[in-house]
Image: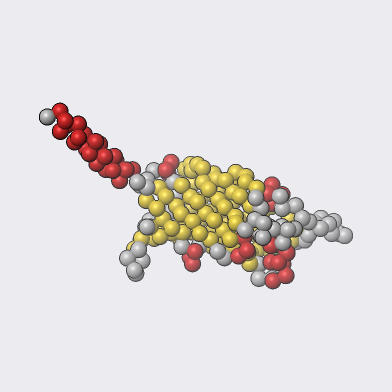
Amino acid sequence: MRQKAWRTTPVLATVAILIAAGIARADTWNIDPMHTTVEFSVRHMMISNVKGQFEKVAGTISANGTDPNSVQVNVTIDAASINTRVEKRDAHLKSPAFLDVPKYPAIAFKSTKIEPAGQGKWKMTGDLTIHGVTRPVVLDVDGPTPPIKDPYGKTRAGASATTKINRKDFGLTWNQPMETGGVLVGDEVSISIEVEAVKQ
């Protein structure tokens, strides 16, 4: 009788572990690259803003139900997909003077903390890696939207986020002084993100 109980206990323990793992398992959402945009804006010659975007974005968002403390965001951006609509300028941005794409092909973001900042608003802290340099950044997030079912039966939701960084913090220091004063490229980069994600 004791031998039977001894044999049964590990089986029950295994079942209990699997059940607990199923309950604790986070929902995972895949970022939809076709409906996600990462845009940036930089001051040009002290008089206007030049805008561009990265056209190849991938990543996941996971969370245990509605618990904000469980949210984990991991995003990878193909640095070579930068597009400012000017081929010569894009080539310069991909060169060692800026992103140095051959050496640092990916830009990455990994969330570390999220805090409420009002109705439907959040402050998301995370580690941003550009040009091989990792720095903490804080994103102002609106959303997520209530989940919906698309025409193909998939569950989708969206969110928006903004932040500002100093490019010099990431080793992007190239510039050119102007005869009239000031510099060719501003240091502050404004970033705007629109995310649409699909539940796995």
Between residues 196 and 22, which one lies in front from this camera angle? 22
Instruction: Left or right? Give the position of 70 relative to 89.
Output: left
Instruction: State whether residue 100 appears in this view.
Output: yes
Figure quadrant of the N terminus: top left
Q: Residue at x 37, y 51 (%)?
A: 27
Residue 13, placed above or below residue 37: above
User: Which percent across, then down, holds residue 25?
Assistant: 35, 46
- Image quadrant assignment for residue 12: top left
Between residues 140 and 54, which one lies in front from this camera angle? 54
Between residues 187 and 15, which one lies in front from this camera angle? 15
Q: Residue at x 44, y 52 (%)?
A: 61
- Image quadrant assignment for residue 24: top left
Instruction: Left or right? Give the position of 81 relative to 160.
Output: right
User: Which percent across, then down, holds residue 189?
Assistant: 66, 54
Q: Residue furthest front?
A: 3
User: Which percent across, then down, holds residue 45?
Assistant: 77, 61
**How many numbered marks are there?**
0
Instruction: Left or right? Give the position of 13 relative to 170.
Output: left
Instruction: Left or right? Give the position of 2 relative to 25.
Output: left
Between residues 123 and 110, which one lies in front from this camera angle? 110
User: Which percent across, then down, holds residue 54?
Assistant: 59, 63
Q: How is the image coloured?
A: secondary structure
Figure quadrant of the C terminus: bottom left
Q: Residue at x 67, y 56 (%)?
A: 103
Q: Residue at x 54, y 44 (%)?
A: 125
Q: Residue furthest top?
A: 2
Instruction: State whether residue 123 appears in this view.
Output: no
Q: Residue furthest right?
A: 179
